[in-house]
Image (cartoon, grey):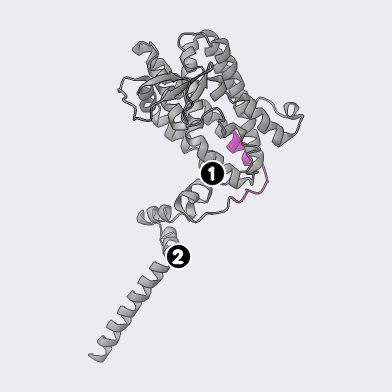
Amino acid sequence: METKLSSEPKSNGVMNGGARIVVDDDDEVLSPTDLSELLAEGTKESHDRAENCQFVKDFLRGRIKKELFKRGTAALYFVYSAMEEEIEKNKDHPHIAPIYFPTELHRREALARDLEYFYGEDWESQISLSAGTKPYVNRIHEVGEKDPVLLVAHSYTRYMGDLSGGQILKKVAQRALKLPSTGEGLNFYQFEGIHSHKGFKQLYRSRMNELELDPETNERIVDESNRAFSFNMMVFTELEEIGKTIKEEVQDAGLGHSHAEIMEGGDINKCPYYAAKMAASGNPTYMCQLAMMLLRYPPCQVALAAWVAVLAGFTAWYLLTW
C-alpha cells in the first residue's frame, strides 16, 4: 500500500498537520511479521472472549438497559481521558508520533457531549471512576509514564475496534434506546474527521507496521493488547453485575425484516439462521421455532400445500386400491 501526501481533496483522505493524507484503495500487502498481523493473530482468542461476554451478547441482541449504557459511556470517558492524556504527553515519542491522530481519533470530547446528553450540564458531578474501570485507567497511566511504546497496544485495541465493530453497536444502541437520529448520545461512535473508515484503518495499520521495533517489543505489544482486552472484559463484567440489580425494563430494539437488521438490532433468537443452527443441534424448542418461522413465508406455505396435496392424493389412491 502506498501512502502519499497531497493538497488535492480526496473522499478517503484525512487531515494531518494541514496536509491531506491519501490512502490508495488497493488491497494492503501485508506480511505475517507486520505488527498489525501479529496483533490480529495474537489477540484472536481475547477478541472472541470479549465478544462472548454476556453483556456484549445482550447488547448485540438489542437488550440494553439505558442506565447500563450511561454507565458504560462514563467508563469509556475515564479510559479515553487517561489514554489520550498519555498519548498527548508522548506525542513526540518515536513510536507514538507516527500514529498520533488527535483530530481524527480522540474520543474524550465526544464522550463528554454524550454524558451531558444523558446526565445534564452537571454530568461531571454525577459520574465517578468505578472499581471495574480503575485498573484499566491505572495501567494506561503506568505504561504512559514508564513504557510509552505499549500505548501502541492500547491505542490499536480501542480505536480500531471503535472504527470496526463499534459502528454496529452504534446502530443497535440508537434503535434499542430510541435515541435521536441526529446523533445525540452517540457522538462517541461518530468520527467526523474520518471520511473513509476503511481507508483510515489501512493508513493506521501501515503507520504501525512501519514502526522500528524488534521482535521482543512486538511480542510485548501483543501481550499488552491482550491485557487491554482483559481490562475491557472487567468493565463488561462489572456492568453485567450492576444490571442484575437494576429493575429498569429492557428497551425494545424493534425487529427489522432483513437478516442483517435482525443481527444488528434485534433478538438473535428470532433469527431464522440462528434457529436453523440450533435445530440442527437437536434442540426441540428451536426445531418448532424454525418450523413456525418457515411457515410465515409464502414460498414455504406453497411448498407445504403442495406436499399436503401429494400426500392426500397418495392416501386416496392407497385407500381405493386396498
The residue depicted at 31 percent of the width and 25 percent of the height is 29
Residue 58 — which label? 1
Q: Position of residue 83 (x, y in %)?
A: 56, 19
27 drawn magenta: no
**Residue at image coords 32%, 82%:** 312
Percent of width and height locating residue 135: 57, 21
Q: Residue furthest left?
A: 321
In the image, the segment drawn in magenta is 238-252
Using a 10 Å C-alpha cutoff, classify the residue at mark 1 as few (fewer than 14 neighbours), some (14 to 19) or many (20 or more): some
Location of residue 240 (image quadrant): top right
Spatial CA distance of label 2 from label 1 is 24 Å
Q: Nearer the viewer, residue 135 or 184?
A: 184
Q: Amino acid at mark 2?
A: Met
Q: Is residue 36 left or right of residue 52?
A: left
The kind of secondary structure element at disc 2 is: helix
Magenta highlight: main SS: loop
Disc 1 is placed on an element classified as helix
Write down the residue under mark 2: 292
Outermost front residue: 8
Q: Is residue 315 visible?
A: yes
Q: How many neighbours does mark 2 have within 10 angstroms: few (below 14), some (14-19), or many (20 or more)?
A: few
Residue 89: quarter of image? top right
